[in-house]
Amino acid sequence: MITLDLKVLPTFCNDWPILEIHHNGELICKQKIKEQQDLKFFLHAKKESNNKLEIGMSQKRFGKDNIWDTETVNEKIIKDRTLTIVSCSLNQIDIKDLLIKNQYHVKIVDQQPIYHPTKVYSEGTMNYNGAFYLTYELPLYNNLTNQKWKKPVDDSLSYFSNHTLVFHYEQDIKLLEEIEQICNEIEKKLSA
């Protein structure tokens, strides 16, 4: 069981935003947010494959029934229906940085132009219908650590000062597996 802690802050325009959360394709939350809220959910993660978490906003109108949930004056937004992720964590590990790194996936609705970008950078504010996505695996702490800090290896750096090698233990694991295999073979010969 994994605990999702989420703090969200809404803004009002014609109505309050709708928060939607999906985990592994299952809707776990769909509720109107009228004030800053601290929410807690318990997620059932799959051990054998990737888990997918989606945190988004829905039902913002872009011309449906001639209603726009963004009001402007002289091309400046004066009111807007938005939802901001103030903080987000899995088992008390902050993941907001991972959510926003993956960009916000926009769901085009109503009279939004088809050429509107379907992925936008955001510091956590949802201005459109859509969602932030995060995939993770178990064990959770190992996976989140790698997602946060593991970098692609830069072979142009000296071996002894190559900071990009941190969290790249693939060769070490391979060597340990070979040693384990040799030890198992020796044990079989000694017990025979």
Image (cartoon, rainbow, N blue to C red):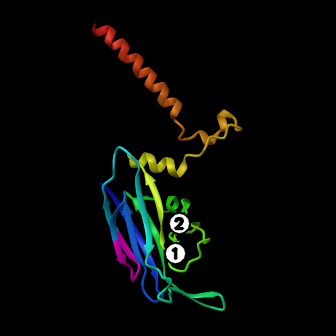
- Residue at point 40%, 22% (across, down): 180
Residue wearing tag 2: 104
Residue wearing tag 1: 128
Taking the view exactly as shown, the residue that stands out farthest to the left is: 191
- Residue at point 47%, 30% (across, down): 173
Dot 1 and dot 2 residues touching (CB under 8 Å): yes
Q: Nearest the camera: 50 or 59? A: 59
Q: Residue 31 at x, y = what percent? A: 35, 76
48 inside magenta stretch: no
Which amino acid does the dot numbered 1 rest on?
Tyr
33 inside magenta stretch: yes
**C-alpha span from label 1 to label 2:** 9 Å
Which numbered marker is on residue 169? none
Q: Which region is colored magenta?
A: 30-39
Which amino acid does the dot numbered 2 rest on?
Tyr
- Residue at point 52%, 61% (across, down): 97
In the image, is residue 119 above or below residue 37?
above
Q: Residue 45 at x, y = what percent? A: 33, 52
What's the magenta bit mostly, secondary-structure-wise? strand
Position of the N terminus, as image quadrant, is bottom left
Q: Residue 73 at x, y = what percent? A: 62, 92
